[in-house]
Image: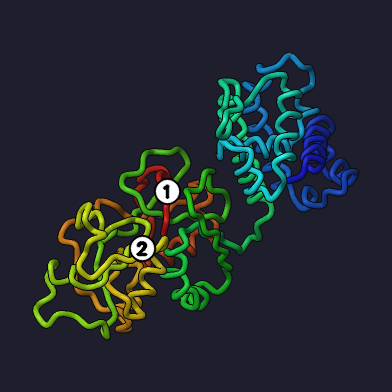
Amino acid sequence: MGEQQVRYRLQVVHGCRSNGHCHAVASCFGLSLLSVNGKGLIAEREAIDKAAKLYEPIENLTARAHMSRNINLNAVRIFAVVARHSSFQRAAEALSISHGAVSQRIKQLEGELGVALFERQARGVRLTENGERYQDAVDAALSILTTANANLERGQSQVVLHLGPSFASRWLMPRLKRFTRQVPHVAITTEVHEGFLQRALGRNEIAIWPDRTPQHAPGQHVERLTALQLVAVCSPQLRRPDSPMDFEAMLSLPLLQDAHRRWERLIGPGAHQAKGGLLNFDRSALALDAAINGHGVAIAPVHMMADDLESGRLLEIWREPESSGQHLFMSWAEQHRADGPVNKTVNWILAEFGLQEAGQLLGSRRGRWND
């Protein structure tokens, strides 16, 4: 959302508060979004109210009057990226702008606030005490606005699934046609994440991720889908020892490992010296594709390859005797559970994992995903 657009929306909301003429004020600013119905206006106003409360600690950083009118929101966004990367250069690369543009915006922001936000060091930058306080408020406020935007812009029948890349390609993609047949009036959009989603889920949003024991988070409903049962698989065409395939015999074959480094965990520090060799991939999906093509033995949760095992493209040759301790979870905003698209999508996913309708509240989203 651009700075000018935010200012317009702030004026619209404040105008509506003062005179109650929502449609008239919205019309003055050309914002048809707010004239569709009252829901858009209420969501926008509540998001801005929450953001304003989060910005109260920021206002204590400076004695400038009317600071909120003068703050450059693009500079605030750039600050958030620099703080996350601890580097002007890496922030510039992430934003596809020049190092000089990043430096200029941060100087501008520090000037407007009247405080230093970063300590410049030989290698990168470090947040000052004021910078750390500012980062907490900025991250929270941007999260609220991002969720509010998603709520306002998303179609009534569209559901966004937040997934890891390998889960999206290995589990969801083979099932999309079935979803379309069984839930014909809901459109799925996927958002793939390398790291964990750092904001609350909004309307028509669902996240699926692996974790151990989530902690409680108000308003966040979480369902346990399945335990992560690890199995080793290979192509039926891969040449294997004639003897029964025990763990030691399996180690004589080429091993395919993803970013979770599961072979290293099972074998120990000497995994790279495995008899058949060890080949590393950054994604489970790539390691499984290599196994299908006969390059070795991959290890991954069984739900990631269920279709390949059923079709015979992969052959299970070993199963971890003990639980990995991780589970696959699904979460959504509790207040939107009754919404038709979310309700239908949640129930379809539960059915795919052999579960009934959602029940027990388990906790919050936590951790990160690579798959």
Q: Which residue is mark 2?
A: 280
- What is the tally of numbered marks visible in this picture? 2
Q: Can you give x and y, in whole percent of width and height, for residue 226 in the image?
A: 31, 59
Query: Which picture quadrant has residue 272?
Result: bottom left
**Residue at x-position 32% and y-position 63%:** 257
Which element type, helix, strand or loop, lies under badge 1?
A: loop
Q: Residue furthest right?
A: 28
Q: Nearer the viewer, mark 1 or mark 2?
A: 2
Q: Is residue 107 visible?
A: yes
Is residue 4 or residue 148 the one in the foreground? 4
Mark 1 surroundings within 10 Å by alpha-carbon count, few (fewer than 14), some (14 through 19), many (20 or more) = some
Q: Can you give x and y, in whole percent of width and height, for residue 193 in the image?
A: 51, 55
Relative horizontal placement of residue 249, taking residue 264 as reference (left or right): left
Kind of residue at disc 2? Asn
Which of marks 2 and 1 precedes in the sequence?
2
Kind of residue at disc 1? Arg
Q: Can you give x and y, in whole percent of width and height, for residue 296 in the image?
A: 29, 74
